[in-house]
Amino acid sequence: MSAPAAEAMQEPFSRKTLFWGIFASLLAAAGFFLLSTYAPDFRQPEGGATPLSKGGTGYAGLVEWLKLANGQPPPMVSSVEALRSGLASEFLLIVTIAPNSDPAALARIVKLRSGKATLFVLPKWLTIPQPNHEGWEMKVERLPDTIVNDWLGRIAKAKLGEGKGSVGEIDVAGHTITAPEDLQWVANDHPLIAAGTGRAVLTELDKQPFYILTDPDLLNNAALKDPQKAAAALGMIATLEPGKGAVMFDLTLHGVGQKYDLAKLLVEPPFLALTLSVLAAAALAFLHGLGRFGPPRTEARAIAFGKQALVDTTAMLLKRAGRIEELGDRYAALMRARAGALLGAPQGLPGEALDRWLDSRDRGETQGFSRRFKAANETRTLVQMHEAAQELHDWTTRRLGERR
């Protein structure tokens, strides 16, 4: 078999194919991560009293009506930063309150919109979703006054008036329309829209450019099906907005764009720079790993050749077996026999006699060998054993040199 054929069998895919496959996988993983992170923001609220709802209590019709009247769709505020922006101060912000809105978000809006034109639309109806029409809803009953008063009290020190409105028609920005069913009103001597003497449907706070529409049936989708009410709604907003077409709707009260988590922190400033730095470092490490520095390292043998390897292996086995401390006397006896053989000791001498004969070979020291033999015989640690063995070895080498 030729060399190219062998390489083809070993590498079924080219390096370029592997590179693009890995790149596509990383790109898909990054896209999945981003979509999963921001998926809750893409899910707009359906139904209820929101500017995106097409149900009867929603305000999608008013948004479309303002788009047709002004030639452009009104902006939707979905973040706290947009509420703080200077551009927001030039617009009339319409805040549509639903029974399940976030009270903390309303308090934040009231604080951030201080001194800026804002229209608050109170809730009125309790509804349930229609099972066969997504986004549609069925009216169940009017909300209890206690619930509506709770929302009203977060904006102004006022309560809904008791009893139904006694008028059949009301004047809204020069348009006479039929009064809504179960009209909601508050007591006020200077109403912007009145439902009789001292009864206000639209009122303004004394110290803030805050407007409160007590009855949402003048602006919601159910109201705009009547052409007269649709024209009246447009006229009412025109009297409140600071400039022509300067209207925007709030979505933060309904939870849009207000959910933060760890994943968002990783892909948004100021931590975005850290995330990009980590990714760049990972990419450099990956590219660094594609190349090799120098020739490949040869795998070493499990058991090496040579006397040194044999000695090291034997020492390791003895150490693991816990027999190192028992080798002192045996090594001393081995060195006694070796020294006797090298120095020509008579055959058959017993141990102590051999020690005396070896001591007699040392003319410069008394009991030179026996003293070293005894020290090696009594060792208990590796350090002592090493020192005693060195002493015996040096003594034997010195006497052998003297003999020669």
Image: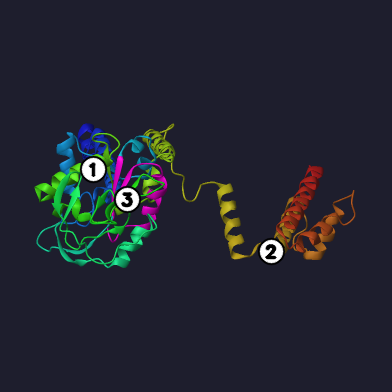
Identity of the amino acid at label 3? His
Task: Identify the residue under disc 2.
Answer: 325
Q: Earlier in the sequence, mark 3 or mark 2?
A: 3
* Applied colour scheme: rainbow
Separation of marks 1 and 2 at Cα, in angstroms? 100 Å
Residue 237 badge: 1
Q: Residue 238, position in %: x, y?
A: 23, 39
Point 72% across, 55% down: residue: 338
Point 14% across, 58% down: residue: 136
Q: How many marks?
A: 3
Separation of marks 3 and 1 at Cα, in angstroms? 18 Å
Q: Is residue 53 visible?
A: no
Q: Residue 205, position in %: x, y?
A: 37, 49
Q: Earlier in the sequence, mark 3 or mark 1?
A: 3
Q: Earlier in the sequence, mark 1 or mark 2?
A: 1
Classify 371 as above or below 210: below
Task: In this rendered view, identify the residue nearer to me: 33 or 228.
Answer: 228
Labels 1, 2: front one: 1
Point 36% across, 42% down: residue: 83
**Helix, strand or loop for disc 3:** loop
Task: Identify the residue under disc 3.
Answer: 190
- Left or right, 324 with respect to 400, comes to left
Identity of the amino acid at label 1? Ile
Identity of the amino acid at label 2? Glu
Within 10 Å of disc 2 (Cα), the crowding (few <14, some 14-19, many 20+) is some
- Left or right, 392 with respect to 281, comes to right
Q: Residue 100, position in %: x, y?
A: 29, 61
What is the span of residues highlighted in magenta in the rendered image? Answer: 92-121
